[in-house]
Image (cartoon, grey):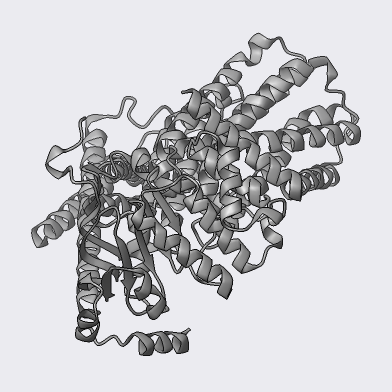
Amino acid sequence: MTAHAILTLAWLLVALYMIFIYAPSDVNQGNVYRIMYVHVSSGWTAMIAYFLVFVGSVWYVWKRSPFADDVACASAEVGFIFCSCLLITGPLWAKPIWGIWWTWDARLTLTFVLWLLFVAYLLVRSFFINPGRAALLSAVVGIIGFVDVPIDYMAIRWWRTQHPQPVIMGGPNSGLPPSMEATLFVSAGAFLCLFFYLLRQGLRLAEARREIGQLRRLLSE
Amino acid sequence: MMHSLEIIWILFLKDLRLEWRRRETLASICVFGILVVFLLDFAFQPAGEESLRLLPGVLWIAFAFAGILGFNHSFVAERENACLEGLRLAPIDAGLIYLAKLLANFLFLAVAEAVIVFAASLWYNFSFLPAFKWFVVIVAFGTLGYVAVGVMFGAVASNTRMREVMLPVLQFPVIVPIFIGAIEATTSALKGDAPGQFASWVRLLIAFSVIFIVLSFLLFEYVLEE
Amino acid sequence: MPPDTTHTEPALELRGISKYFGDLAALRGVTLRIARGESVLIYGPNGAGKTTLLRTLASLAQPTEGEIWMDGRRMDRYPATCKAKIGFVSHATFLYNDLTVRENLALAGRLFGLRGVEKRVERALELFMLRERAGFLVRNLSRGLQQRVTLARALLHDPDFLLLDEPFTGLDAESTANLENLLRKLPERGKALVFSTHRFAQGASMAQRLVALEKGRISYDGPLTQASLSSLRIEPEAAAIENKVRL
């Protein structure tokens, strides 16, 4: 656990160094573009978190293993943070480049929907009268939400191709020079490392909670 | 198979009979839907050409709000005297309970939609007749997909505190495709486009409905479990 | 898949059942076997797990740990077969307020896939003296009458295992005597009767076997004799009075 913490910290420092010092300025965007490293890394991490929520949910419905529920729940909690980070850095980057904070472009819309699905999942968990059912019902919500994402994506794509598109620079990966690409991968790696560190903390917390529950049950006897 | 259909039919008739005795759901969702159209008319004050641009959105917002009311009520009624548990005692598949609820809610919302459309047609001075056939097809599949998700999450939300808030939070992100597809297709159809122009949206609505009905059918058992 | 032949003795069984509600344990490792023809009284203070035990037997509550078996089959693998043999009466009536008595019974009968539903419903109405009220909406019935409808509903499909959670709640003296008579006959007809009640004396007079629960565990399981009562320090009348006070 400590090793993981140190690794995460070191990796994040390296990523910071690369983002601010190693990576060159962009020809068109100057220094503003550097937020991309945080933005894109958060995005990838949020996707992985969402996928883990789905895997944990299916696994829980199938095998009823409390560990699967812990994985789904912890990924949702941490994923929500990264997804929020994605939604915050997006407009910060968009304003100087596109001149607007927000546009209902396909990817932005989908990100917002994803964020709402995270919120829905977490709210279901916290609003349960009977704690025993929270796991099962949030798993159901997790599965439905995941199945929904590709359909959302398709609908939004079609919808937006019928409307005038804002002028956007090509995807972040299109023709990045090697030094920028390296920086992107290092920072994405650092974010992932951080994600898994937080996930493990979440799992430990859940385990401790279960243990306390067990002790309480023993005490009440 | 025959037996399953029979069970769905029995449960569906039960819901109709309950509704007939109380007339709570239908009355409330119709009135609520009309109120939404009425308020949006105030808000936008559309005239002439504009009404065509606004109408599909107004209609689907009214449908969506009316639907939410119905889904919430549908399971609150089942919780009285723990009737839902009574159903779970019977040797029937939980998915059948879902399908019966789906049918009943579809019917109720369809009736409300007819009333809403009639009101909107008067207030917006708009005739739906030229494109009526396609309009009905689009509304039918859009409603089916919406109800498929709504009934499922209505059952989930009925277990939570603050279920009136929970249901929209759960279902609106999921029904984004229905909303986009239905509004785009409705706009296109009412404009008088050829069916080919909006066929892909109708296909999306159908695909969405099928996927979510199957998924909910399979998962409903877990929603009822304790 | 053929039923597991190593456990073919017909019975309803709980094997190592625990049920947790968060930090709360309603049942802790309960193992229990109920055969047809038995009459079992579930007894214990409030919060001992009586209701959860009965709900688990009825497959309304999914156990956190352990398995439920019926006649050599795991209940969760053959839910329909098992549910068809169970009748359950709980605190809630399971009745639709806006359906009539007859409609409620007919609905239950159809859901259980019974043949000759009308005839069975009429017989049940007769048995529970509900004939004159058959056309009334459940909403308009007194609690005691509703309880009778609930019992009629639970017995409609002639279940092998009848589970009753406080069946005498709200019944007047006549209905109580009537129900007692009816329930007494069930074990003779090869049905199993499992019930909980606050009125110990009354329950004891109907049961041959006592299962005492304490904090989610079985503290006594055996024949209902004077000796077993004194070892449990339950004095029939005192227990009855004590529970009345608590109620």
**Quarter where residue A161 is shown:** top right
Q: Residue at the location (36% across, 51% down)?
A: C189
On the picture, is A40 further left or further right than A194?
Answer: right
On the picture, is C125 further left or further right than A179?
Answer: right
x then y, percent, for residue A83: 39, 48
Above or below, B102 against B22 in this view is: above
Q: Quadrant of the N terminus of chain A?
A: bottom left
The tally of labels here is 0
Q: Residue at the location (68% across, 20% down)?
A: B137
x then y, percent, for residue C226: 24, 82
Q: Residue at the location (44% across, 87% down)?
A: C246
Q: Nearer the viewer, residue B207 or A52?
A: B207
On the picture, is B61 further left or further right than A108?
Answer: right
Q: Is residue C87 visible?
A: yes
Q: Residue at the location (21% across, 51% down)?
A: A196
x then y, percent, for residue C119: 58, 39
**Quarter where residue A34 is shown:** top left
x then y, percent, for residue B163: 56, 57
Q: Nearer the viewer, residue A202 or C163?
A: C163
Q: For the view shown, which residue lies furthest in the left direction? A: A3
Above or below, A38 against C110 in this view is: below
Q: Is residue A81 visible?
A: no
Above or below, A97 against A4 in this view is: above
Q: Nearer the viewer, residue C152 or A180?
A: C152
Q: Quadrant of the C terminus of chain A?
A: bottom left
**Quarter where residue C88 is shown:** bottom left
